[in-house]
Image (cartoon, helix red, strand yellow):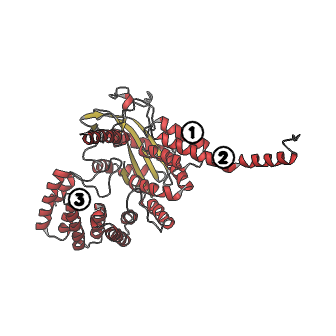
Amino acid sequence: MNTLRYSFSLLILMTGLKTFSQNTVPQHLNVKEKIGWIPFDKSIDDSNFKVCDELNIEEYYQVNPSYGEGMPAIRKYISAHKQILESMCEKDGYVIVRFVINCQGQTDRYRTKFMSLNYTDENTVNAELQKKIIQLTRNMGNWTAGKYDGKTYDCYQHLKFLFKNFQLVDVLF
Amino acid sequence: MIRKHFITWRNLFAFSITFTISCNVPAQNKQSVEITQKLLDSLSAYAQVTMQSDLYYKLVLEKYPNTHEAYMSRSVAYNKGGEHATGFAMLNRAVELAPIQNLGYRAFVKLYMMHDYEGALQDCLRLDSLTSYAKPGVWGEDMDMVIGLCYLQLKNFQKARSLFTNSINTVTRESGKQWNSPRVFLYLGITLMKEKAYSQATQVLNELIQLNPNYSEAYYYKAQCYSALKDLKNAEATLEKCKQVFKKYGAEKNAYFELPYQIYPFMLSDLSSQ
């Protein structure tokens, strides 16, 4: 009987530890400020865009939001604008766009960065291209909100546009 | 008789020398290492993307600037959140300080999260050259498989084939065939498909199906091989099996990135209509 009791306690403890240590489940941190936090900026963000829980905007890998059938759907949408993006590219590297998907699948709070192929921060480069990428991703329409254990969540998502030889060679997350 | 002086000048000199030596660098280093380890252990209490976690690692680095674990740990949150310039600046420093411990993780991030196949390959080859006696995993994956995948993505199919085969042979010899990652068979099959060796690819994918009968990807790429061979009867039958398995078990996914050669439901209907 004691063995059974100890085994049960151990099982509960292990389950608890596993949940606590996993990074691929919602963390419920109850804070706005975290690495990659995007504060609301009234000069560029839509004031009508609401998140369900400002203190618990999870990361994409914790709640798995999706767009259509996934990355192929995003690539298909972007491919229609490939030429214009390539014509705006001044330097090879990654344009990284990060944004918020709310619990209803709407998006806002877009921010971009440009990083060279050597992984150095060069945010001032490709400024027009960065603006265009924000416009395109904004126009993609709604996503399917991130979900875990039957509950929908707000979350951060990012997309990377990889340019080589002034060609858009990949879009990834 | 009571001695007048307990401490002679000679004793005082010897004492001061001993004291000076005991206060010297080695003792301080010993203390630093202990404190750093204790701090690092305690930091696991904070969730990865929190400001507290980042701040404490930053404080560790201010006091102990050569702690590669702190650079690496800080980099993870930034790279996962798409702040790669910051993440890589930290990860590169971790690699400078301790290449054997950190090259594998950097290769992994370059390969799967950045699609920087050349960069990942260089990191893997460097790690391989530094550890030829051991062949450590690349963030938990077999090194030959990861190097092979870099070559596959760089379209060097001959080298990719050789490395995947080597990976399978080594794991099979050392631990048994069932201990191979299903993906190594998948990548070998895809490499053979790219070389238009469809019959050989089918054989490899059959081996994968034998080992993992619920692996949808194996059926999908096998159906593609039959389709390329214009064997429409087998292509249809394999695709039908793929749909059944996919419906029940789905496809392999990773929360952080899209897996190479990941399959999606629409791909199955697209292949049907071909």
Same chain check for tags 3 and 1: yes
For the residues carrying marks 3 and 1, which lies nearer the camera in this image?
A: 1
Secondary structure found at label 1: helix
Subunit that carries the residue with mark 2: B
Three-letter amino acid code at the position of disc 3: Glu
Residue A157, image quadrant: top left
Q: Are marks 3 and 2 on the same chain?
A: yes
Instruction: Work out how far the residue at label 3 is from the one at label 1, CA to CA, in angstroms.
Output: 46 Å
| Same chain check for tags 1 and 2 | yes
Location of the N terminus of chain B by quadrant is top right
Of label 1 and label 2, which has the lower sequence position?
A: 2
Would residue B261 appear left or right of B18 to someone viewing this image? Answer: left
Element marked by disc 2 = helix
Whether residue B215 is visible to the viewer of this picture, yes or no, is: yes
Disc 2: which residue: B28
Asked where in the image residue B141 lies, by quadrant, the reply is bottom left
Task: Return the residue at label 3.
Answer: B217
The quadrant of the rendering that contains the C terminus of chain B is bottom left
Find residue B160 and name its label: none
Q: Which mark is residue B59?
A: 1
* Residue A74 spot, x, y in % from top left: 30, 47
Q: CA distance from mark 3 to mark 2?
A: 56 Å
**Is residue B212 shown left or right of residue A154?**
left
- Residue A33 in the image: x percent, y percent? 45, 32
3 vs 2, front mark: 2
Disc 3, disc 1: CB below 8 Å? no
**Quadrant position of residue A21:** top left
Whether residue A166 is visible here, answered yes or no, is no
